[in-house]
Image: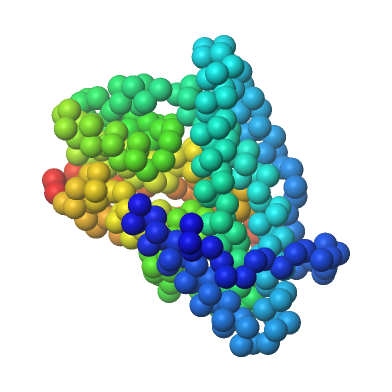
């Protein structure tokens, strides 16, 4: 709760800060960006609605147990690859993603595999991509960003293998 | 809920205002259609498994989530709009543009790491950066840095759930990744999208 409040305070504080800078550039600049931001908001709301309401249904047909099963204690690069797919396919928000990572660690999952899972989740979790990235960014950028990011969970796992456990 | 903006957004008096280059949005693209189809199929599967009650349960839960998210989305949009208005465009394209080199990727990484808020800030701001002259490489560095080494999610979720040791260790491992992702993005982008120019040079 307090974390959410802190986020809101920081967020609206930043908005006020940059808004003030814009205002000092002159009211027309301020008004233009206020209008621009509001129009963006109005344009984005239907897509956010589709994302929020839709990803609930998509999440409901991918049960968590399936993901946990993929993160079994099998090690090696096949395990890393499975972890990457599992990270991308994990439904729900950060609580679910990190909880699955913790469960995997406790039930004997390899550390590089869990790192790959957490990094892949951060980079590709489908729900965040659908809900946030695609509505706000040009679609071409999103696909490009995802494609370019594919090697990096593997790089993270390799670094984890080299430098060892926390 | 007490953190609502002191001033309501200006009512859009006139949608006919001059469109700014690079910020034109198609209302419905292929991505939206694919997602809508995916959602329809998933909702149908939920209905077959759990009946109408199951569908309505998810709907009410997600609608309340949606209501809670909306003010933050507004804040993110305003932040993006103000930032794209107050950042000097030539300066952005010099320090984050295609020719900004390693420095541009490092600036993008630092920016992503310190950006406050969640996805409702990161993506509007990233989109604003693209619009004022940042290239794909620097923007990728920023987005990847926000998601991998940004403090917001780490403090709010990862440390409480996964523990401080794992989180810090994971962040240390992730430190080089945004710059590498940005560099790879730039490398691929140049080869994918500037081919025709190179051919012209040869002939």
> Residue at horizontal 37%, vertical 26%?
A64
Residue B54 shows in the view: yes
Q: Is residue B6 left or right of residue B147?
A: right
Q: Residue at x 57, y 24 (%)?
A: B56
Q: Left or right? Give the position of A156 relative to B52.
A: left
Q: Does residue B142 show up?
A: no
**Which quadrant of the view contains residue A109?**
top left
| Viewer-nearest residue: B16 or A116 | B16
In this rendering, the answer to whether B194 lies above or below A97 is below
Q: Position of residue B194 (x, y in %)?
A: 65, 59
**Residue appearing at x 48%, y 22% in the figure:** A61
Q: State the count of labels.
A: 0
Q: Quadrant of residue A41?
A: bottom right
For residue A162, side relative to residue A133 (left or right): left
Quarter of the image where the C terminus of chain B is located: bottom right
Name the foreground residue: B100 vs A70: A70
**Viewer-side residue, A4 vs A79:** A4
Residue occupying image coordinates x 53% and y 36%: B62
Between residues B93 and A31, which one lies in front from this camera angle?
A: A31
At which x and y percent is residue A146?
Answer: 50, 45
Is residue B129 shown above or below B170? below
Q: Quadrant of residue B87?
A: bottom right
């Amino acid at each position: 709760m307090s974390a959410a409040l802190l986020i809101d305070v920081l967020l609206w504080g930043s908005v006020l800060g940059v808004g003030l800078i814009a205002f000092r550039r002159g009211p027309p600049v301020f008004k233009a960006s206020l209008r621009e931001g509001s129009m963006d908001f109005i344009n984005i709301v239907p897509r956010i609605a589709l994302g929020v309401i839709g990803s609930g249904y998509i999440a409901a047909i991918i049960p968590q147990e399936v993901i946990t099963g993929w993160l079994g204690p099998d090690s090696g690069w096949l395990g890393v690859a499975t972890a990457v797919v599992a990270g991308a396919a994990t439904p729900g928000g950060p609580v679910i993603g990190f909880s699955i990572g913790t469960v995997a660690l406790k039930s004997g999952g390899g550390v590089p595999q869990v790192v790959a899972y957490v990094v892949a989740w951060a980079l590709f979790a489908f729900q965040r991509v659908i809900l946030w990235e695609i509505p706000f960014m040009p679609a071409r950028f999103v696909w490009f960003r995802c494609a370019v990011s594919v090697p990096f969970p593997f790089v993270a796992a390799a670094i984890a293998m080299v430098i060892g456990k926390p | 809920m007490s953190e609502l903006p002191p001033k309501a957004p200006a009512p859009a008096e006139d949608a006919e205002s001059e469109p700014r280059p690079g910020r034109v949005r198609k209302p419905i693209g292929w991505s939206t259609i694919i997602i809508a189809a995916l959602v329809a199929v998933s909702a149908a599967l939920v209905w077959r498994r759990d009946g109408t009650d199951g569908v309505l349960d998810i709907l009410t839960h997600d609608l309340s989530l949606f209501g809670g998210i909306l003010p933050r989305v507004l804040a993110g949009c305003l932040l993006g709009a103000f930032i794209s208005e107050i950042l000097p465009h030539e300066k952005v394209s010099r320090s984050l543009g295609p020719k900004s080199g390693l420095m541009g990727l490092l600036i993008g990484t630092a920016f992503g790491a310190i950006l406050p808020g969640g996805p409702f800030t990161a993506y509007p701001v990233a989109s604003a950066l693209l619009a004022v002259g940042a290239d794909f490489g620097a923007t990728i560095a920023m987005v990847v840095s926000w998601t991998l080494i940004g403090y917001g999610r780490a403090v709010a979720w990862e440390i409480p759930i996964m523990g401080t040791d794992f989180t810090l260790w994971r962040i240390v491992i992730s430190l080089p990744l945004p710059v590498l992702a940005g560099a790879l993005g730039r490398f691929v982008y140049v080869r994918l999208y500037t081919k025709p120019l190179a051919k012209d040079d040869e002939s």
